[in-house]
Amino acid sequence: GEKLKQQGGEAGEGALDKGGGSSGPGRPGGEYAEASTLSISNDGLQNIKREEGYRDKVYDDATGRHIDSWDDITNSSGHPTIGVGHLIYRKEDRNSSGAAAKRESGDWSDEKWGDYLEGGSKTMSETEVEELLAQDIESHTRWKEDITKPITQNMFDAIADFAFNAGNAAPERDGVIGAINDGNYNAAATALRNGPGNPERRRKNAEKFLED
């Protein structure tokens, strides 16, 4: 994974330090750093790609079927998706807080993804997929600014996968960030394990979070 950088000065919440010891009971081992200085490791990125899969055409994330026209998605519980789990929304599909909110109706005609429908003239190249994924990772790791206690790279990667899958608001909404900020890393792992979505993926998130 990516190297954690020494922040300088004495070990503390803004500096790299080791888990365990005098840092309190129950804190996992490993190198700790301020969350805002971290980014996803290559291992974490590859894990998201494995979990999400890759599609070069628009598909319905509820059924996995390619979409021939936007009408195909109107009565589905899913969302149009492309690349590595990239959800497609109209601009007006975002509420005042920036969260995604699927509308029951609206015009998809000006959507740039129209050419990527099944039968359309375009498919996503590997480079385009990677560029789109990098943008999505950035937007799904904004939660790091809300963490006040140091975390490890494994913790960051686990939360990044959770947020990518369950939404950027999930780490705070489901108690992961609150538990970390209380210094209760085991409770944060439990919150990950109990989060929404695939139970097996949540289990792996919790185990990655506690890895040294």
Image (cartoon, rainbow, N blue to C red):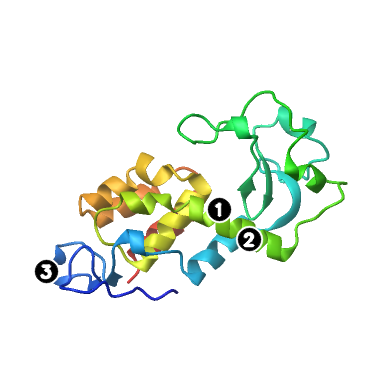
Q: Which residue is mark 1?
A: 136
x, y percent for residue 115: 81, 46
Q: Which residue is mark 2?
A: 131
x, y percent for residue 193: 39, 51
From this viewpoint, is residue 148 visible? yes
Query: Disc 3 on helix, strand or loop?
Result: helix
Q: Which of the two discs, 2 and 3, labels the residue nearer the N terminus?
A: 3
Amino acid under disc 1: Asp
Quarter holding the C terminus is bottom left
Q: 55 or 127, which is in the foreground?
A: 127
The residue positioned 65% from the left and 34% from the top of the image is 90
Query: Disc 1 on helix, strand or loop?
Result: helix
Q: Which of the two discs, 1 and 2, labels the residue nearer the N terminus?
A: 2
Residue 170, numbered label: none
Amino acid under disc 2: Glu
Classify residue 21 by image quadrant: bottom left
Do labels 2 and 3 touch, CB within 8 Å? no
Q: 29 or 127, which is in the foreground?
A: 127
